[in-house]
Amino acid sequence: MEIFKSNDTKASKEFEKLLDNQFSKTQSLVEGKIIEGIVTKITEKFAFLDCGLKSEPILDIHELKTIGLENKIKVGEKIPVLLERLEDREGNVVVSASKAQKIKGWDVLVKAYENNEPIIGKFISKTKGGAIVEHIDTGSLMFCPGSQISDSPLKDISHLFNEPQKFALIKMDKVRGNACVSRRQIISSGKKEDKAKIIEKYKVGDIIKNAIVKGYSSFGCFFNVNNEIDCLVHLQEISYSRVNHPEEIFTIGDKHDLLVITVDKEKLQVGCSIKQLSPDPFEKISNYELNKKYEVKVIKLMDFGAFCELEPGLTTLLHSSEISWTRKNVSPKKTFKVGDKISCVITEIDKEKRRIAISHKLTVDNPYKVLNEKNPVGSIIEGSISSSNDYALYVKLEGYDIDAFLHCNDLSYTKDPETELKNYKIRQKIKVKILEIKDDQQKVRVGLKQTQKDPFDYFKDKKINDTITVKIISSDNKGLIVQPEGCEMNILIKKSQIAVSANDARPSRFVGGERIDSAIAELNIEKRKVSLSIKLLEEIQNKEAVTKFSSPLSGKNLPFSTLSDKLKKKDKEKK
């Protein structure tokens, strides 16, 4: 090995020059910068670049094709790449062409955003909430929100795909590298000048003919005028009467005349009114009286009621609860048609709130009051079963549009209520007794068993401890089912009440059909409660026998009658 003792030699100076050149190249290349590489070699999958470094970085050919650089895949072509790392773990240089393209594109977008300049892009795909836009010049991808695609709602945007068009950059996130664009802003800015010329045509006081209802919101209704401008009619300018929502009055596609009341040239808006085209009809309310019948015209039907006109422009609401006395949850749409003329009674006139309330049911007599007058509580009336549920029947009373309530407990005195309920069918005619009428609540309660003889009347002249003859119907472990003679009621004599002796208190002793006597152990006429006892009858009979056939001296002459006294005396002596 040759050792250089002096730097002044020719060989030393040449070596020093080579080192300086290589070091200067390395210093100029910094990670994160975009550099140019020359294609030196191409294989099936990779392209090799000469970037003036110690090794040749490689690029994936698929990556180059993806970003649109397939025409650069030739030996000698220059390709801009991002120098990611000068040396990885294996000593290779790492570069990226796609990242370089994105960074270059980002710089172009930032410049356009700062200068407020539009860019050329195209829609390439749909995404949640909007669409993806590709920048034509750089291939950078941007997001366009759905609300910024057009100035009018579009159900389908497929016709806009892959068509180069202008976009406005509305947001740039330099940290995340995200860009947001708007097509709507470009469209609106183009229309703004045209709209300003259109606004100049209108003046306060002008009447617009045949404006078409385009849409509505909670604050007003939008009209399309001659397909060139949209005008707003505020909720308060729709009608002199109260309107909760424009949909109560208008239908999409309807035509109406408008009066121009405001023109805002700065905001490019025209405000209109419908109600001011006609005199205030509420000034004529003095011609109408409360609780008086008038004929009204149905102009609009809603789920909650019908809007009617007393006269053109003087609108009032007929609420669904005021349509019928007897029908609940009445559907106005099934009861009336637009254009129908019906009779109503004015129930309220509020001049401050400009509100008129009417009632259709008040034009006829309250059927509940009529029923109370002609068929008061206690009357028997015929009806037909209109409907039923698990615990009651509803009976339509003859001559009245009233469905009376018949509980299953009021079907029979003696039979099981739920079982008896199944024996009745829809449209079956029955006679019922009116038990209760609540005309203020529109309710009527009737009973079927009340039209029959009450078997409990058998006990009205009876009292506790009375003896009655009963017929045994059946027996089980609980006791005996019996029926008093002359009465259709079945009564249970409990097992404990069959006999005084526990050995005789066996229900199985009886097979059914026998006639026996029993005593009334409990009786409550008001509560319709009665209990029978054979045991009580035996006790009463035994007591009567002792009272009737014994004397105060009975038992004294028996040999053991004084035995207990003698034993007690003997115990005392021992103590």
Image (cartoon, helix red, strand yellow):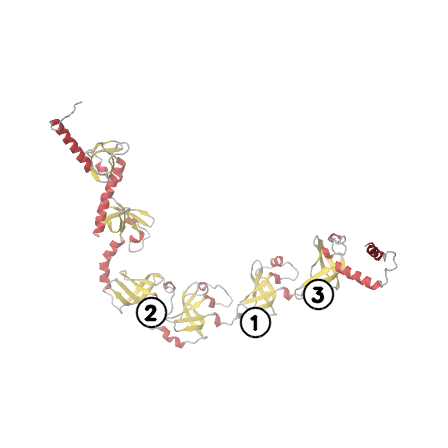
Mark 3 is on which residue type? Phe
Q: Which dot marks residue 459?
A: 3
Sequence-wise, the earlier of marks 2 and 1 is 2
Sequence-wise, the earlier of marks 2 and 3 is 2
Quarter that holds the N terminus = top left
Q: Secondary structure at mark 3?
A: helix
What is the distance, in whole Å, between disc 1 and disc 3 at their CAs? 33 Å
Residue wearing tag 2: 275
Query: Can residue 406 be seen by looking at this rendering?
Result: yes
Position of 186 with respect to 335 (left or right) is left
Q: Return the residue nearer the eye: 558 or 439.
A: 558
Badge 2: how crowded within 10 Å, few (<14), some, or many (20+)? Answer: some
Mark 2 is on which residue type? Lys
Query: Can residue 118 be seen by looking at this rendering?
Result: no
What is the distance, in whole Å, between disc 2 and disc 1 at their CAs? 48 Å
Instruction: Identify the residue at image location x=31%, y=63%.
Output: 232
Question: Which of labels 1 and 3 is toward the front?
Answer: 3
Dividing the picture into quadrants, the one containing residue 312 is: bottom left
Locate residue 179, reporting x and y percent.
27, 48
Q: Which dot marks residue 482?
A: none
Q: Secondary structure at mark 2?
A: helix
Sequence-wise, the earlier of marks 1 and 3 is 1
Quarter that holds the C terminus = bottom right
Q: Which dot marks residue 372?
A: 1
Locate residue 161, reporting x and y percent.
28, 47
